[in-house]
Amino acid sequence: MVKELERAGLPTAHVCTIVPISQTVGANRIVPAVAIPHPLGDPTLSREQEKEKRLNIVEKALKAVQTQIDEQTIFE
Amino acid sequence: MKLELASFYVKDIQFCEKTEFRDGILKVNKQELIELLLCDNRLKDVELDIARPGEETRIIPVKDVIEPRIKASGNSVFPGFLEKPLTVGEGRTHVMKGMAIVTCGRIVGFQEGIIDMTGPGADYTPFSKLLNLVIVANPAEGVSSYEHEETIRIAGLKAADYIAKSVQDLLPDDIKTYETKPIFESISKYPNLPKVAYVYPLQSQGLLHDTYVYGLDAKKIVPTFIYPTEIMDGAIVSGNCVSACDKNTTYVHQNNPVIEELYERHGKDINFLGVIITNENVTLADKQRSSDYAVKLAEYMTLDGAIVTEEGFGNPDADLIMLCRKLEEKGIKTVLITDEYAGRDGASQSLADADPRADAVVTAGNANELIVLPPMKKIIGLVDAAGIIAGGSQKSLKKDGSIEIELQAITGATSEIGFTKMSAATY
């Protein structure tokens, strides 16, 4: 999906938990997520803390698609 | 650590008034066993059935398969469940060969398997060759899915223990001895043989994806050393059956063919030093920590070679590749055993992750391959499960009772510890 979107000319961020798989598959902009069963949330946190965490990941992804890159980049 | 496995070969199972083992025939008092299992008030109902090789019987949905074993001393195996979590793996263990306890019953999630006792499906599952005493158990109202899974898991262990008691005081048909010496002794005994260990990842990702070590949830361990004979005595118990083709039932932990083969060659062409268990957790940090830790142990043991197996597919491929890469970087020659999810036509990428250092890989087959299981005369369990288990779809169950499904739904079909007859070769 990530590669097809990019092929169509849309800069794409891959938000994923297992970064090495994303690297092997060939995503260019990689944003690490929380865990496989809950990539964009964390049930161990309070609602407020979780919201902050989610916002942080989404903002990182938005920044990633706006960033010029020359090689596979992980946005920690 | 030295363990004697004393085998009793079971030729048939029958329901009778008294539970006993005589002349190869296991007689089971059905009511007594049902009452024992119903002591757990989280269970609502328990039924028992027998499935023999060659019979037109389908067992669905299968949760676990367990070999009845008991210590000759009278203690149970499965420490942490039926006994205190104290070290096992020494002395003598009585084993009932040729049979298994199979747990079955209302589905917990969408993640259990199928065992056919005859037909094309039977060729793919090693458990079609066993006499199976099947426990069909359902939970009481209000029991959560986690408790449901745990209740059935423990019922299977209890049943195996109950059955194995029938051979506790008998004379076995044969005895085989397995021994692993402390590391320095082992190295000095065979100084010229390459030092090899088995790196054994355990699935550890939540409900129906968990494994237990001495009763401890494997997601909470850091990789550690374990004597192979501890595993034979039930130190590792399965709590997982999602995509049942490549999940290790308790039976295959008890009978791990990698351990069996490494013992066979120990002292001949290799020096088998033991087993490093690790886990397959759901976060990248856990995967990094566990693979580092397992490799640190491997280096500390001064290994020349390692066999790494896998349990599951997708993200566990990342654990597998991390272990391989890091072991090879330490100069430890590494062989991987895995299976493939290469699409129904076999043309897609087989693993989710890859590395050039993974250059010695054994496959147990393509789990996406489609198979048609013909109708069976007898169903033990609930055939409707075919529509919702992993590998199936709502179109899987046909009107005539046949099932069109991927191999991934067949219990043990593509076992990544090699407890299967299927593989593939590259030409």
Image (tube, coloured by chain):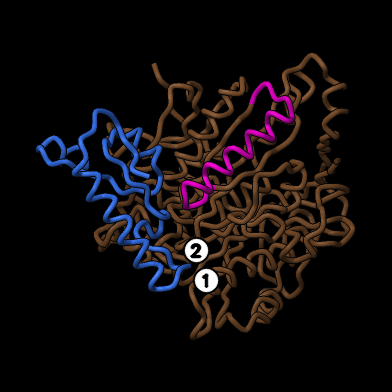
Residue type at mark 2? Answer: Leu
Q: Is residue B389 left or right of residue B83?
A: left
Dot 2: chain letter: B
Question: What is the crowding at mark 1: few (fewer than 14 residues within 10 Å), some, or many (at least 20)?
Answer: few
Which of the pair B192/B53 is nearer the observer?
B192
Nearer to the camera, A58 or B174: A58
Q: Is residue B295 magenta?
A: yes
Circles 2 and 1 in contact, beta carbons < 8 Å: yes
Q: Tell me where residue B218 sits by quadrant.
A: bottom right
Query: Residue B223 placed where, x, y %?
Result: 65, 44
| Residue B246 spot, x, y in % from top left | 48, 46
Q: Tell me which segment is drawn in magenta.
A: B280-305
Q: In the displayed orientation, state which residue is furthest to the left.
A: A8
User: Could you say which chain is coloured brown in the image?
Assistant: B
C-alpha distance separating marks 2 and 1: 6 Å
The x, y position of residue A17, in whole percent, is: 39, 49
Which residue occupies 82% across, 51% down? B93
Q: Chain of mark 1?
A: B
Give the residue at x 71% y 73%. Answer: B29
| Residue B142 locus on image (x, y percent) | 49, 85
Q: Colour of chain A?
A: blue
Majority secondary structure in the magenta region: helix
Q: Which numbered circle lies on residue B207?
A: 2
Label disc, if present, on residue B146 of the rendered structure: 1
Quadrant where the C terminus of chain B sits is top left
